[in-house]
Amino acid sequence: MTLSEAINKAFGSNAVLKNEITNDFILEGLAPLESATKNQVSYIQQDQYIQGLQDSKAGAVLIRESIKDKVPNHIQPLIVDNPHLAFALLSQLFAKGDFIARPHADSKIDTSASIAANVVLGKNVTIGANTMIMPGVVIADNVSIGANCKIYPNVVIYRESVIGDRVLIHANSVIGSDGFGYAQNALGEHTKIEHNGRTIIEDDVEIGANNVIDRAVFGETRVKKGSKVGHSCVIAHNSIVGEHSLLVAQVGLAGSTTTGRNVVLGGQVGTGGHVHIGDFVQVAGRGAVSKNLPPKSKWGGHPIMQLDEWMKFYVSLRRMLKENNKAEK
């Protein structure tokens, strides 16, 4: 399908292309500016990403008219009122099927692996040596699971997810599900953004019960080697958890959150989207991370502040409340 054909099919009455396509090409998919190829489309919704245009190899980019002069000659501009919405509409052309086309077809299961009753396997599934798949697990098409893993009951692993060696995934967790992504039109209606990336869990990771780790919009969501994720955590699309990090129970990472190595996030820590947490950072329980945090620092509170400052603030607040109570009596 050519770019012009894709736009005509996807946009319909929901979006309007404001300029002519002078460089049509066979469209192969969508990708971020930094990794897009000459046969892929990217988009810019926020001005902070404009600087990425010069080095991008994207064939075309969805933009607002206000920045059309910043698009280099080798990229076809696609001028629309709402690039985010236009991207969402195009993403639906590349949506992939999630579940079982031909159960067990072309699967490669090591003879030493243990597959319990009531397990559902898709096509082209790979399961390594000595791995245990417990009852009620659902593994979709093109999933790869390494050696010496334990996948506990009722885990669901969506298509194209990659699980390394010696990984533990506890009951009722979901790996590789769609992220929470929508684009809003002028009427306030929501258009789903199809998540066509994948999820990668590296070696020696342990994932607690009732976790959700979403797949990427494009590219990948990744939990790096040796990390441990507590119960009831959410790791959103395109997030990267660094090596040997600890996420305690009920941590929530918003989309495109990235961390360095050996990060510790206490219970119920939450992040805003597109923030980076540096190597060896610690965030106390219920901390709300709204900005980038430098390496080897400690934080707490909401709004987030240096941990020692937050503790002093908390002590001062308690003292003030006690004094107020005494005064009222």
Image: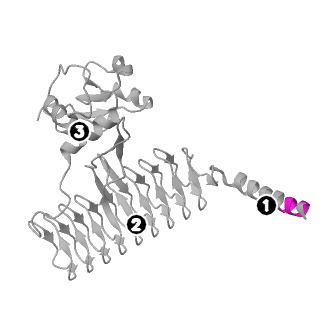
Image x and y of residue 10, in percent: 20, 37
In the image, which residues are magenta?
Answer: 322-327
Few, some or many C-alpha atoms within 10 Å of disc 2 (few <14, some 14-19, many ≥20)? Answer: many
Image quadrant occupied by the N terminus: top left
Examine the structure image and report whether residue 325 is included in the region drawn in magenta: yes
Kind of residue at disc 2: Asn
Q: Which residue is mark 2?
A: 211
Kind of residue at disc 1: Arg
Q: Secondary structure at mark 2?
A: loop
Image x and y of residue 163, in percent: 29, 64
Quote the CA–CA distance across marks 1 and 3: 53 Å
Kind of residue at disc 3: Leu
Mark carried by residue 318: 1
- Nearer to me, 10 or 233: 10
Q: Residue at x 19, y 79 (%)?
A: 112
Quote the CA–CA distance across marks 2 and 3: 30 Å
Q: Which residue is mark 3?
A: 90
Left/right placement of residue 26 relative to residue 269 reads left
Residue 298 visible? The answer is yes
Q: Residue at x 44, y 55 (%)?
A: 242
Nearer to us of marks 2 and 3 is: 3
User: Magenta region's main secondary structure?
Assistant: helix
